[in-house]
Amino acid sequence: MPRITPVDPNRPPATGQTSGTPYENESYAIVARAVKFDWTDVPLQYIPGEWYATHFWNVMHLVLPEGERAMADVFASALPLIDDRRLHEEVIGFVGQEATHASSHESFREYLASHGVDIEPILRRIRFAVGVVFGDHGLTGRAGRAWLNERLGIYAAAEHFTAVVGEWLLDNTEFDQMGVDPTMLDLLRWHGAEELEHRNVAFDAFQYVDGGSFRRARTAVIASGGLAVLWFTTAAYLYKNSVATPRPAGKWMKRKMRTPWPLAFARASHKHLIPGLSFLFVQLALYIRPGFHPSSMGDIDKAVQYLAKSPAALAAQQ
């Protein structure tokens, strides 16, 4: 868990464009839930008959742990700049939730590796992106502050996409009809519900610390492009190297895929098993629109209702 600095009520306001303005957006307690998932007997193809759709969602398990820990670190670093008490508390809850998301997906990553899925090439790439490209680079002073603001903008934009994907997961009924493995479905929807639950926080923190419209648009393009490249290439890699049936010795055989991944993507999207390509461009256009705020997107009641019945969230309460 990143180190979190308490707010100092005697410190002067931060210097961002909206700093010092009372935080008056959605009032909702953001808390981390200590969920756990048992992957015993969960099939590798947890969306029945659909390898590409399965691997599309497997990207979350491989890419998100490093990404969400890095995001938690960046927003924890911004906490001393946030003097509004409620926003400060919401960012603390957001940081806790992101750290929990990382560990939950990492547990299934380990399950994949234990069943013969070669994930190391993907991990090397995401570690390079998070640790080298988007690391803090040891910058201090004005350069360090500018780079912090840039990373806040990138992660705030990424959070917008995860929030709308979260709502998509909550709304999707095809998974129930197809009989997607219930443990995996709970992980996807629990994560999606929490993303929808804290949909405002990263955006509001960025606006409070920086608030520049040009930076918001620029970082949104960077975030959407980076996410698209990382997601599609990772899903294509997994799909190409997909596993089929176990050999007697417990090794997993690779099987060649006959359908090229772009066609497999189009088919899975048409079946409503994954969001379509237009989803990315529509959400980018909405995010960079002047006057945009995440509270205008979706219905937070969906998140509240699912978290009230999620098996993992209910077990965490006990």
Image: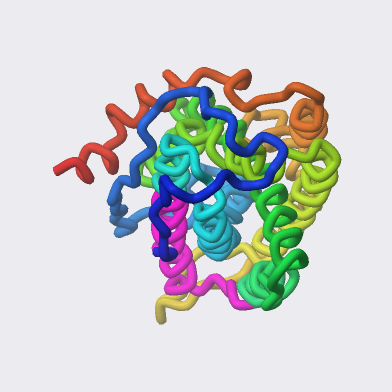
> Residue 271: horizontal and vertical position, in percent?
65, 29
Q: Which residue is drawn at 54% across and 47% down?
A: 12
**Figure check: 64 above or below 221:** below
Taking depth in this image into account, of 3 and 52 the one nearest to the observer is 3
Q: Which of 118 and 292 is in front in this view?
A: 292
Q: Magenta region: which residues?
A: 95-120
Q: Can residue 189 be seen in this view?
A: no
Left or right of residue 90, residue 121 in this image: right
- Image quarter hosting the N terminus: bottom left
Residue 248 x %, y %? 41, 77
Q: In which quarter of the image is residue 277?
A: top right
> What residue lies at 40% left-to-right and 42% top-to-bottom?
89
Residue 89 belongs to magenta span: no
**Residue 296, placed above or below residue 245:** above
- Residue extending furthest left? 318
Residue 190, image x, y percentages: 40, 39
**Image coloring type:** rainbow
Q: Which residue is drawn at 67% across and 70% down?
A: 135
Q: Would you say residue 316 is visible in this rendering?
A: yes
**Rendering coords of residue 315 (x, y %):** 20, 43
The answer to which of 101 and 139 lies nearer the viewer is: 139
Question: Quarter-wise, where is residue 243 in the image?
Answer: bottom right
Q: Judge whether residue 119 is colored magenta.
A: yes
**Closest to the observer, 253 or 313:** 313
Q: In which quarter of the image is the C terminus?
A: top left
Vertical comparison of 266 with 241: above or below: above
In the image, what residue occupies the spot 64% across and 29% down?
272
